Amino acid sequence: MDFAIEHLSKSFDSKQVLRDITFTFEPGKIYGLLGRNGAGKTTLFNCINRDMKADGGSFYFVQDGQKRQIRPEDVGYILSTPTVPEFLTAREFIKFFLDINSESVHIHRSIDEWLELISIAAEDRDKLMKDFSHGMKNKMQMLVNIIAEPELMLLDEPLTSLDVVVAEEMKQLLRSLKKERIIIFSTHLLDLALDLCDVIVLLSHGELEIVDKEDLDGAELKGKILAALREEDHE
């Protein structure tokens, strides 16, 4: 099932952040949404997640040539600053999530099996999440999206502030999840995008542009991307 955006636009006062964006994302790939700070990556995600009303345009799923409206449960949104109920332990949080989503969860594992999947140590599973590190909270945020199995996953710079071990674990986890869903991974870090993502999409001048990786070595590709992003300085 493809995810299509048509003529999406968003402005704040006189500044047009998203300009008539039209793009189609295919399943089985991690898309690196690459742009400078302030380019509009989070704005795009907030419009798709309907946390923010777009000025114009539409987005929907396409399957066998038929359009389908996107439901709230179709989208998993993982923020750069993880939001978890800090007054609960890891076990309590996952039990609560499984209980309220019992009719829609298709993969049945024990709470410990789920926590093992994201490498939450046994001695930490009964601790309040307010005492978790940033990386551990990020893992918990990721886990509920793994359990929910949304068709579309939006990740807004989730690895930027993680240590190297946790970041590598998260990258491996994302690679294992991409087969049957669409993952759009927002970042301003070029090397991270090139390492993790199958397709690089630039958000520049408020528009999306795919970067053809074929026939380019690493240095040429980086040069092409940086040149495109630097153009915003002269807009």
Image (cartoon, grey):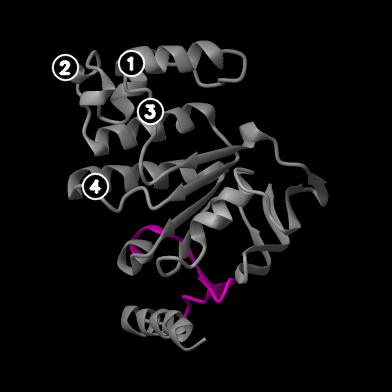
Q: Is residue 190 above or below residue 92?
A: below
Label 3 belongs to which residue? 84
Instruction: State which region is magenta.
Output: 195-214
Q: Nearer the viewer, residue 199 or 34?
A: 34
Q: Residue furthest left?
A: 123
Asked which quadrant contains residue 54, the reply is bottom right
Amino acid carrying mark 3 in the image: Val
Q: CA distance from mark 3 to mark 1?
A: 9 Å
Q: Which residue is mark 4?
A: 162
Neighbor class of circle 4 (other Cα within 10 Å; few <14, some 14-19, many 20+) is: some
Q: Secondary structure at mark 2?
A: helix
Q: Position of residue 105 (x, y in %)?
A: 56, 20
- For badge 2, the amino acid type reads Glu
CA gap between label 4 and label 3 equals 17 Å
Tell me what residue is drawn at x 46 percent, y 32 percent.
146
Horizontal and vertical percent position of residue 25: 62, 57
- Mark 1–mark 4 Cα distance, whole angstroms, equals 22 Å
Label 3 – label 2 distance at C-alpha: 19 Å
Judge whether residue 182 is colored magenta.
no
Is tag 4's residue or tag 3's residue first in the polypeptide sequence? Answer: 3
- The residue that label 1 is drawn on is 88
Mark 1 lies on a secondary structure that is loop
Query: Which mark sits nearer the N-terminus, 1 or 4?
Result: 1
Residue sitting at x 22%, y 16%: 127
Circle nearer the viewer, 1 or 4: 1
Residue that numbered label 2 is attached to: 123
